[in-house]
Image (cartoon, rainbow, N blue to C red):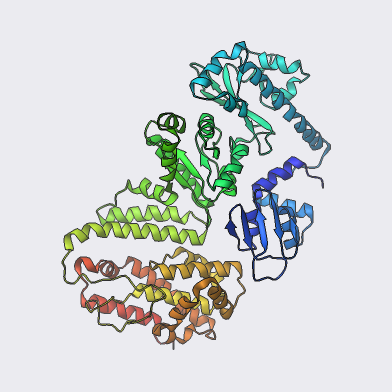
Amino acid sequence: MAFSDQFLEELRGRSGLADVVGRRVKLTRKGREHSGLCPFHKEKTPSFTVNEEKGFYHCFGCGEHGSVFDFVMQTEGLTFPEAVEKLAGEAGLEIPQDTPEERERQEQRKTLYDVTEAATRFFQSQLYGTNGKQALDYLKRRGLADETIKRFRLGFAPDGRTVLKEALAREGIDDGRMIATGLIIQPEDNSRNSYDRFRGRVIFPITDTRDRVIAFGGRILGDGEPKYLNSPETSLFHKGHVLYGQKTASGPARKAGLILVTEGYTDVIALHQAGFENAVAPLGTALTEDQMKILWKIVPEPVLCFDGDAAGQKAAARAAVRALPLLASGYGLRFALLPTGEDPDSLIKTGGAEAMSGVINAALPLSEVLWRMETGGRVPKTPEQRAALQKRLKDHALEITDSTLRSHFLALFNDRLWSGAKSRKDANVRGNSRANWQPSMALGEAPGGGLTGGGPTGGGASPDARRLAQQVLLAIIISHPDIFDHVEETLGNFSFAEGGLDQLRQELISVLLNDADLESDGVKDVLAQRGYAESLNVLFRDPMIQANRILRADAPAEKYQTLWDENVALLKTLETAPEVEKIRHAGDDGIAEEDWERQRALLEQAMHGDRN
């Protein structure tokens, strides 16, 4: 089956080479490329590279190289048509049928680029002609230099009903092709004549990644609605899949490791003229999922620029929520909020490039935008309000499909919620002689105490039931990795408060997602290679872990599955039980001895019981 060049080009852009390769190879981003261990031959030192910008992979060890289609064909044993069909299905693209009619449409599309190019030249000529004086004066007042105007090929559409139509007809372009490119409008009543879409407007040509003009945007001069008008959807132009200025911005963005996303054409052009050549904009709509994916192929953390007023903050919040299901480890968004009443163009005029740089440098991470959106910067005072806030934040975090990233968001929100609530009480309880609760030890320090210490008011750190239960969960999976398929989601949803334990949890998830067939010794070897040898030693030297025979690799499945279920239930109980609230805030009011004894008994029963 034959596929058109345009379809294959669109499919390449939608698929994302690094995403496809990353399903089989653990990739590490290095500058403009990704690297990893070659999937085509055994190696210990990475020699396999993926260049997303150029669209190919190459192994310097065995010489294998190719495009995204080649990779799927080689790793899955598919033919080229089968690889195309698989990738198209994943990207949500319908494969064009190879019919005479479709071939004719493809040929017509090639000539449509000639039509948009001819229209661009016409608009440019009009800008510098007698009819375009008002439009040129407008651009000059906006501070645009002649070089900038020519670089972006800006133009002018005269205020006449058929001026463009007649000009293109003189070049032998028929009405059908003008309609197909969205340049003229044919009324539903076919007895009426077609007419120009753009009239009395400054024209902004929109190009694809090969710098071909595919559509136009027009800004009206004077009063009138709509203020901005875009070309309609055509066979060349799908506005949700294109970013204005992408071709020009991609190179500088990759070099700087930064891409700026603004709200409109003039902002992009003003930023380019001020030296920020890494700026793009969506086309009259909120940033779409496809546009976010395009941005992530250029840099891992784009910066979205919004006005600092209420409308800009709402737009930032909408973008943050929309991005959550698409997030993956190593990729994110930052949000630059401009001063109220300013946009990038006006800010540069009043404060220069330095003012814009300051806004970019102060950009907020996505998690902070969600936090401010839900809290307004304040943690509620009452338990009921805090519980409602916690649920809203958790709901946002659960939208993230990447388990590692999801756990980080959950941990961050929980930490901020608890610390915010505790800080108010700390001001009232300073000096309390029983305020001796300390964070649990970091994984990697010498273990001690277990559950045999002197209770909640003894010296040193108090025993931590939650930490020990979390250790048990990690030990179960490391000793019995076959359980991972059944518990992956549960482990991904937990966020361990202690940094070292949580890092080990995340790395363990990464190891088993990459190779689900590893046995216990293999899991330990890979973790040790990744720098977690000492963490493993500390974990398995813990007396509570050593004493439990179920945590040994030869234990029967029904035993360690039961142990897993009981510790998960225990952790959920500890998250909600009133006793835990007292333990977490021992520095506030202290913990009654009988409460601590109940907590210790619960842990010991769950960890030992009569299973040994």
Rendered location of residue 569, percent (x, y): 40, 72
Q: Is residue 564 visible?
A: no
The quarter holding residue 497 reads bottom left
Quarter occupied by the C terminus: bottom left
Residue ranking furthest to the right: 100
The quarter holding residue 454 reads bottom left
Q: Residue at x 17, y 63 (%)?
A: 429
Q: Is residue 570 above or below residue 152?
A: below
Q: Is residue 292 visible?
A: yes
Rendered location of residue 76, percent (x, y): 73, 62
Q: Is residue 469 above or below residue 268?
A: below
Q: Residue at x 51, y 31 (%)?
A: 270
Q: Is residue 455 left or right of residue 505?
A: left
Q: Is residue 500 above or below residue 111?
A: below
Number of callouts in the render?
0
- Front-most of 437 and 392? 437
The quarter holding residue 241 reads top right
Q: Residue at x 35, y 69 (%)?
A: 573
Q: Is residue 30 above or below residue 131?
A: below
Rendered location of residue 582, percent (x, y): 25, 68
Residue ranking furthest to the bottom: 612
Rendered location of residue 488, percent (x, y): 52, 67
- Front-most of 432 and 446? 446
